[in-house]
Image: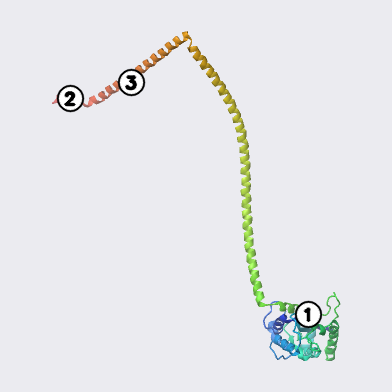
Amino acid sequence: MSLLVLHMDKFKKDAIRGIQSHNRRERESHSNPDIDYSRSVGNYDLHESASDSYAQAIQNRIDDLLMVKAVRKDAVHLCGLIVSSDKSFFTRMGKEETRRFFEEAAAYLTDFVGKENVISAMIHMDEKTPHMHFLHVPVTPDGRLSANCIYTRASLKKLQTDLPGYLQRRGFDIQRGVEQKPGAAKKHLDTREFKQQQEALDRLILESEEVARNSRQIINELEQREEELKKSLKEYERQAEEAEKILQGVQKEVETLRTKQTRLETEYTAHRKQSHEEKDELEAQLKKMKRLQAGYREFLLLPDIRSLHLDFVERKRAEQLQRQQERELQEAEARQQSEREWHIQQEPEAVPQRRHSRMR
């Protein structure tokens, strides 16, 4: 037994361009890997629109309402119904019955929302499971733009019951999907595929090529900045290590200088103590010498000693004079000896000349 997948979503004005791009495959999406673009030629739209633009078709329908009040900027401009089932359901039916299934579903939904409000009924055959995106402007029977009035909890519940009943009467073996209880997990067979479709739509609403390029550029800049920061961090760490080594060397040098200072202070204290001792000793010897000199002068002033002292002084002067005379005599004899030796050295040169003259 196959279950019907029926899901409704609401879109504001800024999401319309993305919805159109996704439905019509106007550009490849990198966010939905389930799309096989080689099979996109098999997609088809069951609704013929007078406009090539979703946004223009929606605006035309809103203008037709001739509303007194302006449409709010955050108003819902478009509602989308996804209709599908499990993959085996479509495989059993084949291509022609699959098209008829979506035609019948689109006919029922058109009656439900009003033909004048339908924008598109696009069938996607290029994904894992065939499905229809049925899009319409949410206009109430009294001509108001209000998605909340059309899709209440009760109306959605009724639609999810009535649509599979209608399809059954058209010859399709399809059952109502399991009613979702608050907080419960989905149990119909297409849960994973349906989630993929919805996630793809949500991502397409926010997708933009310009944003993607800017994001890539920002990422590249951030990665480049990260690399620069890593290099700077490594350089700072290297400098910190060098600074730490220098600091350790300085600390060792400071400790050495402190040790040397302590030693010098000890030596200075000892030297100062020794200098004081030596100074005291020198002063004591000087005082002793002065006392001796004073005693010696007093001794020389004695009458008997004075005459002896004068004789001693005269004798010393005479001895000094005699030594000087002897030194001068020795120097004179040395000069005479030097002159005689010089004459002797000169004499042999003259002797041969005298011998030669006698031979003549």
Q: Quadrant of residue 282?
A: top right
Dot 2 amino acid type: Arg
Mark 2 vs mark 3: which is more N-terminal? 3
Up/down of 264 relative to 36, above or below = above
What x and y, as percent, mark residue 272?
59, 30
Up/down of 206 relative to 109, above or below = above
Q: Nearer the viewer, mark 2 or mark 3?
A: 3
Up/down of 182 relative to 83, above or below = above
Name the residue beneath numbered marker 3: 331
What x and y, as percent, mark residue 162?
85, 87
How many angstroms separate mark 2 from mark 1 (CA)?
A: 154 Å
- How many callouts does the rendering have? 3
Circle 3 SS class? helix
| Residue at far front of view | 68
What crowding class fits label 1: few (fewer than 14 Cα within 10 Å), some (14-19), or many (20 or more)? Answer: many
Name the residue beneath numbered marker 2: 354
Of residues 68 and 305, the one nearer the viewer is 68
Mark 1 vs mark 3: which is more N-terminal? 1
Name the residue beneath numbered marker 1: 194
- The residue drawn where x is 63% and y is 36% is 262
Q: Nearer the viewer, mark 2 or mark 1?
A: 1
